[in-house]
Amino acid sequence: MIWRNIASNFLTLLIVILIAAAAAVAWAKHQFSGPGPSSVAQCVQVAPGASLNAVSKQLAEQGAISSSYIFRAGTDYLDKSRDLKFGSYMVSPNASMEDIVGVITAGGPSTCGTEVTLRIGVRENTMLLRDVDPGTGTYEEQARYVPGVEDKPQEIAAAEDQSDVRLRITMAEGVTSWQVVEALKAADFLAGEISDVPPEGSLAPDTYEVDKGADRSAILAEMARRQEAILTAAWESRPFGLPYETPQEALIMASIVEKETGVAEERPQVASVFVNRLERGMRLQTDPTVIYGITNGEGVLDRGIRRSELNARTAYNTYQIDGLPPTPIANPGRAAIQAALNPDTTEYVFFVADGTGGHAFARTLEEHNANVARWREIEAQRGQETDSPVQTGE
């Protein structure tokens, strides 16, 4: 009888323990997958080589999670404890522990924290220090300067020495390979020599995250790898009947499209004009190629094209030569490459600036001349008339 009571009590206790354990598991699961304690966005940083234990303690201290133990247990249960990715990531207000695990194990570009960015532009390069405001989730500029022209602000110099700061290089569409090389040479947070300027058009405009002391040649190699991948994919999916025999010819066209318009939506239309001209045996007659022949891609031509330069027969003067110039005239971005290989279907063979930043397109010379007259009026009103002919078709 005694043993029966003991057994009964033991079973009762075991049931209570199991119910309590199940309740604890359910509560922990709710804590892991339910809304988190932070009512504002949080910048979560994962240091290089950081352990799950260190990250969980950091998250608890900054109020992003309610329990470091539950966070570790949940991460282990998802089998992601070894998948932490170095970087700084913005997580939304009230993000669950499960959401945060997903963010810090997925990786990808950092989305918050302090960053120093070298922006390589067509007209100038800038170094920019930015930091994310967790309350708004937006970057706020802290300091900037033009390398080689201005002294480096102390804030940027100090930030470059911080172990958790992100260093980025952002290359704009339409810059030349010479401009990229010169910008990398002037970036004192990089290392290594550059022996040669890469072929024009071979570098992908994009944002590149780098480490302090990164090798300049390795960065150029990565830029070239990305551009090759973009061009190969676009070439392989091109429609039938385009007037290019090789991917290089398509890249040359993309560079012309890139330099001819700053309006993204216009790229396929601009490409259609040049494709139509090639197919009809018309000269391209585009100013950017002439300018490249003058500058060799080394800097910007801060004046109009002279009549003598338009009359000179050079390899890049498409007013004087048939077909495409021998090389690209800049590094085109993905959108320009896509436009060159997927142009709109139009009958346009002329275009000229329309005064809004875009262009007026025409099918006939009569239409084009009317558009030119309107542009000349705008030029006269602005006091900007030059000896250069209008784009494509005079």
Image (cartoon, rainbow, N blue to C red):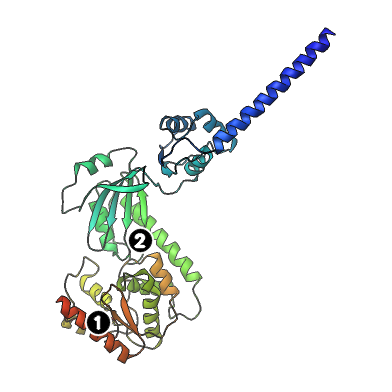
Outermost residue, front side: 39
Please give the name of the residue rendered at 45% of the width and 30% of the height, measured from the top-left corner. Answer: 60
Q: Report the disc number at residue 199.
A: none
100 relative to 151 in the view: left or right: right
Q: Give the number of callouts.
A: 2
The residue wearing badge 2 is 205
Image x and y of residue 69, in percent: 52, 28
Work out which quarter of the rendered image holds the C terminus and state it.
Answer: bottom left
> x%, y% of residue 251?
38, 71
| Element at label 2 | loop
Residue topped by disc 1: 390
Q: Amino acid at mark 1?
A: Val
Q: Which residue is drawn at the image coordinates 21% and 67% (left, top)?
A: 300
Most extreme residue toward the bottom is 366
Whether residue 194 is visible to the viewer of this picture, yes or no, is: no
The mark lying in front, picked from 1 and 2, is 1
Quarter residue 57 falls in: top left
Q: Quadrant of residue 308?
A: bottom left
Kindly identify the residue that appears in the image at 52 percent across and 33 percent down: 71
Residue closest to the eye, 186 or 40: 40
Q: Is residue 145 above or below residue 159?
A: below
Query: How far separated are the C-alphas under marks 1 and 2?
Result: 28 Å
Identify residue type, mark 2.
Pro
From the viewer's perspective, is 46 left or right of 304? right
Q: Sequence order check: which comes first, mark 1 or mark 2? A: 2
